[in-house]
Amino acid sequence: MLDAVDEKARSLRISRNRLIIQALEREVDARGWSPGFFAALQRLDPDTLETFRNSMSVVRRSRRSKRPVEL
């Protein structure tokens, strides 16, 4: 999959990241969020909210800076 993405990015003379961002922007613009999506997220029970916060804490601690991949 990444080989195909890299090939497409090279053909467009843009970075892989730029290609991915453009694809995501098209997808997000193509359809809006369903009604009530964000409201439902705000109604999380305290246990679920605490679990989510703990998982995000693990994600943040696990992040590492990575060098960009050469195309």
Image (spheres, rainbow, N blue to C red):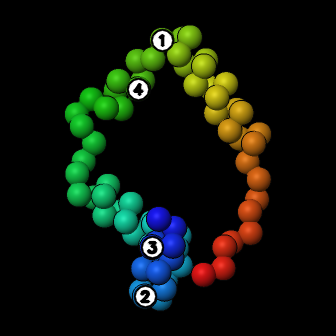
Query: Which is more N-terminal, label 3 or label 2?
Result: 3
Q: Amino acid at mark 2?
A: Ser
Q: Nearer the viewer, residue 69 or 39?
A: 69
Q: Amino acid at mark 1?
A: Asp
Please give the name of the residue rendered at 36% of the width and 32% of the height, measured from the top-left corner: 38
Q: How many angstroms separate mark 1 from mark 3 (CA)?
A: 42 Å
- Label 4: how many Cα within 10 Å (few below 14, some 14–19, many 20+): few
Q: Amino acid at mark 4?
A: Leu
Query: Which is more N-terminal, label 4 or label 2?
Result: 2
| Dot label at residue 41 | 4
> In this rendering, is residue 50 above or below 5?
above
Query: Which is more N-terminal, label 2 or label 1?
Result: 2
Please give the name of the residue rendered at 45% of the width and 73% of the height, measured from the top-left corner: 4
Q: How many angstroms separate mark 2 from mark 3 (CA)?
A: 11 Å
Q: Is residue 35 left or right of residue 57?
A: left
Label 3 sits on a secondary structure element that is helix
- Label 3: how many Cα within 10 Å (few below 14, some 14–19, many 20+): few
Q: Amino acid at mark 3?
A: Ala
Please give the name of the residue rendered at 28% of the width and 42% of the height, measured from the top-left corner: 33
- Label 2: how many Cα within 10 Å (few below 14, some 14–19, many 20+): few
Q: Can residue 14 be spotted in the picture?
A: yes
Q: Is residue 70 left or right of residue 18?
A: right
The picture places residue 22, in percent across and down from the top left corner, at 39, 69
Q: Quadrant of residue 50?
A: top right
Q: How many angstroms separate mark 2 from mark 4 (CA)?
A: 40 Å
- Residue receiving disc 3: 4
- Residue receiving disc 2: 11
